[in-house]
Image (cartoon, rainbow, N blue to C red):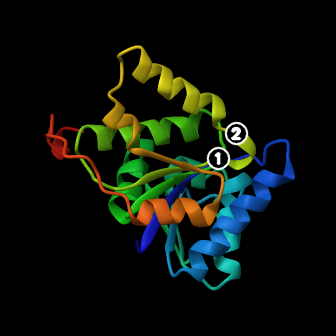
Amino acid sequence: MKSITVFCGSSFGTDDIFKDHAFLLGQTLSQQHIQLIYGGADVGLMGAVADGTLSEGGKAIGVLPHFLQSKEIAHKNLTELIIVETMHERKTKMNDLCDGVIVLPGGYGTLEEFFEMITWAQLGLHTKPIGILNIDGFYDDLIRLVQTMVDKGFLKQVNRDMLLVSASIDELLEKMRSYEAPTVGKWISKGKI
């Protein structure tokens, strides 16, 4: 993996452990020569993961919609800042630039980005590993809900197994490196998304 997209909150949350782990993830990516692709902001966990990457001399590429840049939240020290017009263009560009995705704690936006990427994988539009860094059990309830989707017949186990989860950065990266996507027929072409 040469580039990983990180989706995460634009807030720090209520516990320093979230900020600390976001910064540590950025450092770890840089130390392992993995380029960071992320939302381009300098606030919250987004800023922390970028700062962690940059603190180790790594490359951090931000993808930011024009309307957010005008709110002066763009990180000023990135390796590259790509400006796009819409939120959908942002996700598409971030997907194009990465070899995998890691999800950190966040709110509605983080979940929306995560679910779109895992849905694209389920549809066979990409075969990239998607991992949740489950800091301090933040995503425990979501993981239980996903299992309930399987138990109640709304999700196949093979698609549940596409989701990689760990509380450890190193373990999650190892799971992502050894990930093999299931053989899934394409239901729609990439041009239709």
Asked whether, in this view, residue 28 is left or right of residue 188, the answer is: right
Q: Nearer the viewer, residue 67 or 44?
A: 44
Disc on res. 186:
none
Q: CA distance from mark 1 to mark 2?
A: 6 Å
Q: Quadrant of the C terminus?
A: top left
Circles 1 and 2: CB atoms closer than 8 Å: yes
What is the three-letter code of the residue carrying label 1? Asn
Q: Quadrant of residue 190?
A: top left
Q: Residue at x 28, y 53 (%)?
A: 127
- Circle 2 packing at 10 Å, graded few (<14), some (14-19), many (20+), is some
Tell me where residue 43 sits by quadrant.
bottom right
Asked if one can make out residue 28 in the rendered structure from this viewpoint, the answer is yes
Residue placed at 41% from the left, 66% from the top?
Answer: 177
Residue 134: numbered disc: 1
Image coordinates of residue 107 in percent, x first then y, are: 64, 36
User: Considering depth in this image, is 25 or 71 the residue closer to the camera?
Assistant: 25
Disc 1 residue crowd, few under 14, some 14–19, many 20+, Cα 10 Å: many
Seen from this angle, which residue lies furthest top? Answer: 152
User: Disc 2 designates what residue?
Assistant: 138
Q: Is any atom of residue 73 visible in this view?
A: no
Q: Where is residue 91 drawn, in percent x and y?
A: 41, 49
Residue 184: % across, % down? 19, 41
Q: Is residue 49 left or right of residue 112?
A: right
Q: Residue at x 32, y 60 (%)?
A: 96
Q: Locate the N terminus by quadrant.
A: bottom left
Which sits in the foreground, 125 or 93? 125
The amino acid type found where label 2 is placed reads Phe
The percent coordinates of residue 138 (x first, y second) are: 70, 39
Query: Dot 1: what SS?
Result: loop
SS label for mark 2:
loop
- Name the residue rendered at 70%, 54% in the picture: 45
